[in-house]
């Protein structure tokens, strides 16, 4: 699972990558470490408005939800959603309207095995320019946006990651198709089968960055109470 990401790109770089403008540009600040377990707010670009970046809470909530974010996440964990879980949901609930978004970032935390020990790694794009990960989102009755990051099986057979999954990174040429509301989400998931063409760096990082991160042993849990959240 992926609970910590980074986005140190400046505002102009994010806007250029997504060919969109921030709806509230003065609110954007680059952040070295974004902890999903701490009710973090991130910019996203949605199918509803693919010209303006919105701010959304990482960790999807049901549209009618009125409680506190933390207790819900402790029980449901909607920070990530596997492509397989999402596909099964869409195949079963044919009339379900799952809304898609893009989440810009410059890197994320991963784990590798080194000399019998688990080593935290930071994965980032060359020159720290942003790339986009596929996500799903909704808008609560009070107007707030919430979202989940889509994760998929590792496409890189040479990766030394001990995780079975990786964030669903979309190449830039597929951004418009992912956000195209005329393409239903079940078919849009096929876009995630195409490998991205970004050059990503991997290097060991300090273990203190992993505080409050869930263990990798939880990665096989059903991570999304999807019938409630989407």
Image: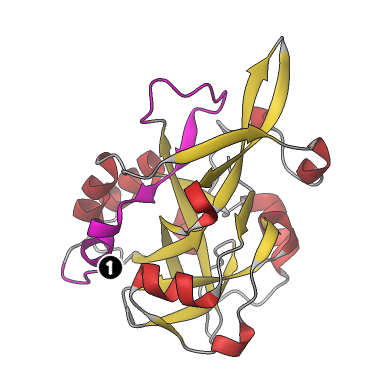
Residue at 65%, 75% in the rendered image = 29
The C terminus - image quarter: bottom left
Helix, strand or loop at mark 1: loop
Percent of width and height locating residue 147: 51, 65
Residue 155 visible in image: yes
Residue 230 visible to an observer of this rendering? no
**Residue 121 found in image quarter:** top right
* Magenta stretch holds residue 154: no
Magenta segment: does it hold 156? Answer: yes
Residue at (57%, 54%) from the top-left corner? 78
Left/right of residue 197 with respect to residue 80 in the rendered view: left
**Which of the two residues, 85 or 36, is positioned nearer the viewer here?**
36
* Left or right: 208, with 84 as reference point: right
Q: Quadrant of residue 197?
A: top left
Residue 90 x/y as whole percent: 29, 52
Residue situated in front as seen by the camera: 115 or 83: 115
Q: Which residues are magenta?
A: 155-182
Q: Residue 132 at what x, y percent from top left?
A: 41, 58
The residue under label 1 is 179
Which of these two is toward me, 212 or 114? 114
Q: Is residue 157 left or right of residue 118?
A: left
> Which x, y percent locates residue 57?
60, 70
Q: Is residue 217 above or below residue 181?
A: above
Q: Nearer the viewer, residue 49 or 104?
A: 104
């Amino acid at each position: 699972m992926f609970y910590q990401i980074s986005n140190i790109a400046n505002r102009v770089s994010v806007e250029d990558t997504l060919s969109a403008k921030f709806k509230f540009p003065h609110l954007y600040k680059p952040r070295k470490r974004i902890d999903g377990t701490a009710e973090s707010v991130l910019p996203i670009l949605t199918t509803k408005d693919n010209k303006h970046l919105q701010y959304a809470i990482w960790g999807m909530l049901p549209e009618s939800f009125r409680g506190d974010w933390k207790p819900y996440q402790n029980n449901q964990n909607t920070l990530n959603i596997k492509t397989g879980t999402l596909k099964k949901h869409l195949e079963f609930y044919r009339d379900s309207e799952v809304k898609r978004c893009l989440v810009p970032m410059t890197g994320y935390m991963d784990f590798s095995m080194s000399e019998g020990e688990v080593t935290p790694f930071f994965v980032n794009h060359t020159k720290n320019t942003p790339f986009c990960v596929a996500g799903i989102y909704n808008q609560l009755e009070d107007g707030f946006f919430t979202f989940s990051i889509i994760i998929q099986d590792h496409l890189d057979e040479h990766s030394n990651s001990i995780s079975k999954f990786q964030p669903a990174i979309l190449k830039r040429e597929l951004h418009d198709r992912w956000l195209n509301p005329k393409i239903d989400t079940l078919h849009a998931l096929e876009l995630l089968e195409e490998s991205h063409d970004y050059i990503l760096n991997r290097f060991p990082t300090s273990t203190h960055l992993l505080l409050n991160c869930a263990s990798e042993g939880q990665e096989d849990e059903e991570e999304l109470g999807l019938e409630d959240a989407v």
